[in-house]
Amino acid sequence: MEKMDLSAMSAEELRKALAEREKAENREQEKREKSWREVKDAFVTKAVGTMREISGMMRDFKGEAVSNGNALHKEMYEVFGKKEKEGLKQFSLVTEDGMMKLVIDRQERQELDETATVAIETIKEVFRAKFAVRNKTMYNILDGILVKNKKGDYDERLVAKLRKFEGEVDDREFSEALDQLSKSYNTVGSSTYMRAYVWDKERERWDDVPMAFSRI
């Protein structure tokens, strides 16, 4: 490219030259941005497509594996002449060499209904009366258990956590409120989980097989 002699150019010629240079730079920038957007779209489209495919495969695999696992577990009682345990929510299947294990776990999702409000208020009143003044540390611990999560719900294990302090609280109203709170739980659904493990001989422990991207 021929080098321009700026000293020989008029003010108008300088303005035009600068304008042309700016246009050329803008065109180059637009090309870079367009290229980046095209590469970005191609990458995201491929990544999302692959993840959707893997997600579908995992969903199908889980359904088949859980079904086969449940069938094997049920058949085990018949083969070995044992009485099937009712209400069993978790079981394991281990290879004969003891090197691999599959755990199938069904967990119920529970929520507190509107009747829980009265019981929780009673519990809070007992906490305030017993600990707010004479034992701030205990009060803060107990009161912290009653904090709702980001979704605005109480912990599903709320009753179990509070039961641990029943002896220390030692209050009839507290115990009755816990009983009432237990009755306020309603099952709203269930989820089935499946986890795989491989035995590590050197460290003598079960290592889980990670399925979440964050752990791979």
Image: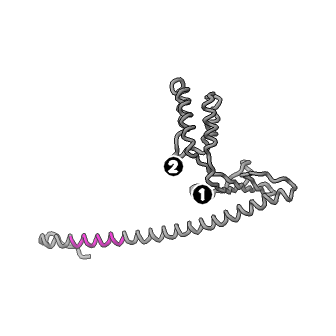
Residue 21: in magenta span: yes
Q: Residue 55 occupies which quadrant of the picture?
A: bottom right
Q: Amino acid at mark 2?
A: Lys
Of residues 23 and 196, the one drawn nearer to the viewer in this rendering = 196
184 with respect to 7 (left or right) = right
State whether residue 212 is above or below residue 155: below
Quadrant of image for the N terminus = bottom left
- The residue depicted at 72 percent of the width and 63 percent of the height is 67
| C-alpha separation, residue under disc 1 versus residue under disc 2 | 23 Å
Instruction: Return the x and y of residue 18 as percentages of the image width and height.
Output: 20, 70
User: Which of these two is toward me, 199 or 158?
Assistant: 158
Residue type indicated by callout 1: Ala
Q: Residue 193 location, x and y as percent?
A: 66, 56
Residue 7 in percent (x, y) is at 14, 69
Q: Quadrant of residue 24?
A: bottom left
Which of 79/47 is in front? 79
**In the image, is residue 110 part of the stretch drawn in magenta?**
no
Nearer-N-terminus badge (1/2): 2
Write the start and end of the magenta stretch as one range.
19-32
Q: Secondary structure at mark 2?
A: loop
Question: Which residue occupies 54% across, 33% down?
Answer: 124
- Magenta: main secondary structure equals helix
Q: Nearer the viewer, residue 196 or 189?
A: 189
Identify the disc placed on residue 212.
1
The residue identified by callout 2 is 151
> Which quadrant holds the C terminus?
bottom right
Circle 1 crowding by C-alpha within 10 Å: few under 14, some 14–19, many from 20:
few
Q: Position of residue 119 (x, y in %)?
A: 57, 37
**Quadrant in the picture for residue 50:** bottom right
- Its colouring scheme is one colour
